[in-house]
Image: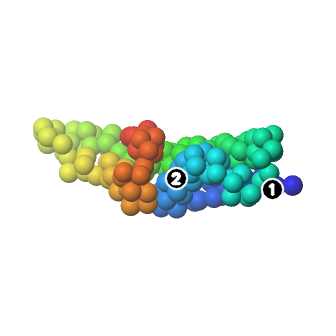
């Protein structure tokens, strides 16, 4: 029996661990679903029994589907962690207005110094994901994971 996969939270606890795993898993899935499933019967030198070849291809595609389920779990964890990091940086926002009111100072008329920093975890994640899988190699859905966090 094949052991049940570990929950995504156990697979990678830190965002830096999730990003490369997510990118690599996408590449593995493209390879499994594409050329590998079609080429495997020849690589294994299976007899030309179409039923056996279909079973082998089906097994590979089923494995790819299970990996895709794990990838979706990683994506959910990635989005959750990115959103949490960005939201943490927004925590002081409610206190800003109160602070100006208590000191009698004018409210700012342009963005505060920390506003560009709110999305810094997201920018870092996009850069790290690009380094892990290469911008050209990354499917749009990977970039969408970062966008979902925003």
Front-lying residue, 50 or 79 = 50
Marks 1 and 2, how far apart at CA: 24 Å
**Label 1 sits on residue:** 3
Asked whether, in this view, residue 18 is left or right of residue 65, the answer is left
Asked whether, in this view, residue 79 is left or right of residue 118, the answer is right
What SS does tag 1 mark? loop
Q: Position of residue 73 (x, y in %)?
A: 61, 45
**Label 2 sits on residue:** 27
Asked which quadrant contains residue 42, the reply is: bottom right
- Per the rendering, the mark at residue 147 is none
Residue at x 58% of width, y 59% of height: 12
Q: Relative to residue 51, is residue 8 depicted above or below? A: below
| Residue 6 visible (yes or no) | no
Q: Residues within 10 Å of mark 1 (few under 14, many from 20)?
A: few
Q: Residue furthest right?
A: 1
Residue at x 35% of width, y 56% of height: 127
Dot 1 or dot 2: first in sequence order is 1
| Residue 41 visible (yes or no) | yes
Kindly report which numbered mark, 1 or 2, lies closer to the viewer in this rendering: 2
Q: Residues within 10 Å of mark 2 (few under 14, many from 20)?
A: some
Residue at x 38% of width, y 61% of height: 131
Asked whether, in this view, residue 87 is left or right of residue 58, the answer is left
Front-lying residue, 34 or 19 = 34
Front-lying residue, 53 or 103 = 53
Q: Position of residue 6 (x, y in %)?
A: 71, 55
């Amino acid at each position: 029996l094949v052991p049940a996969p570990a929950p995504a939270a156990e697979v990678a606890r830190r965002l830096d661990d999730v990003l490369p795993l997510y990118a690599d898993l996408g590449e593995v899935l493209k390879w499994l679903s594409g050329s590998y499933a079609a080429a495997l019967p020849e690589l294994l030198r299976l007899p030309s029994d179409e039923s056996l070849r279909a079973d082998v291809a089906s097994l590979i595609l089923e494995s790819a589907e299970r990996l895709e389920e794990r990838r979706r779990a990683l994506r959910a964890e990635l989005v959750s962690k990115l959103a949490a990091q960005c939201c943490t940086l927004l925590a002081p926002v409610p206190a800003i207005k109160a602070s100006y009111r208590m000191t009698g100072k004018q409210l700012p008329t342009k963005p505060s110094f920390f506003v560009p920093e709110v999305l810094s975890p997201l920018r870092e994640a996009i850069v790290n994901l690009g380094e892990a899988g290469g911008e050209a190699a990354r499917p749009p859905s990977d970039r969408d994971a970062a966008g979902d966090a925003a």
